Image (tube, helix red, strand yellow):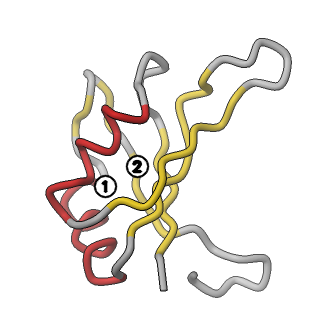
Amino acid sequence: MTTKLHIGNLPRASTNADIEGLFRPFGLVSSVVFTKDPVTGLNTGCGTVEMNADVDAQSAINRLNFSQYGGRTIGVSRVRDGVGNSR
């Protein structure tokens, strides 16, 4: 079962390859999806990363949450479903 992580405050010029490279040291990355502005279609500076193993996702959170990336302090946390449970 995969674990989905929210990542915020990214530089808007970040690419999927950049973020996959940031998370790869912690385990296999299934997907990277950026949130896009509906009007401009540009990256909003946040998105999700899906990792194959929960233990890898937790390692990424522990190391990357509140770390510096591209001159910004990024936030990394688990995506929560509508009932308040972690995925």
Callout 1 amino acid = Asn
Q: Secondary structure at mark 2?
A: strand
Residue projecting furthest to the left: 25
- Above or below, 87 against 14 in this view is below
Q: Amino acid at mark 2?
A: Gly
Left/right placement of residue 65 relative to residue 4 reads: left
Q: Which residue is mark 1?
A: 65
Q: Is residue 46 left or right of residue 62?
A: right
Image quadrant occupied by the C terminus:
bottom right
- Determine whether, in the image, residue 14 is placed left or right of residue 34: left
Tell me the residue that label 2 is attached to: 75
Q: Which mark is residue 57?
A: none
Q: Residue at x 22, y 36 (%)?
A: 68
C-alpha gap between disc 2 and disc 1: 5 Å
Residue shown at 42% from the left, 35% from the top: 16
Q: Quadrant of residue 56?
A: bottom left
Image x and y of residue 36, in percent: 69, 29
Q: Residue furthest right?
A: 39
Q: Residue furthest top?
A: 40
At mark 1, the secondary structure is loop
- Of callouts 2 and 1, the N-terminal one: 1
The correct choice, above or below, for 73 with respect to 25 in the image is above
**Badge 2 vs badge 1, beta-carbon distance below 8 Å:** yes
Q: Residue 25 at x, y = what percent?
A: 14, 57
- Dot 1: few (<14), some (14–19), or many (≥20) neighbours within 10 Å? some
Q: Which residue is more in the foreground, 75 or 46? A: 46
Name the residue: 49% across, 69% down.
Answer: 78
- Please name whichever residue, 31 or 75, is drawn nearer the observer in this view of the structure: 31
Q: Position of residue 32 (x, y in %)?
A: 48, 47
* Label 2, residues with CA under 10 Å away: few <14, some 14-19, many ≥20: some
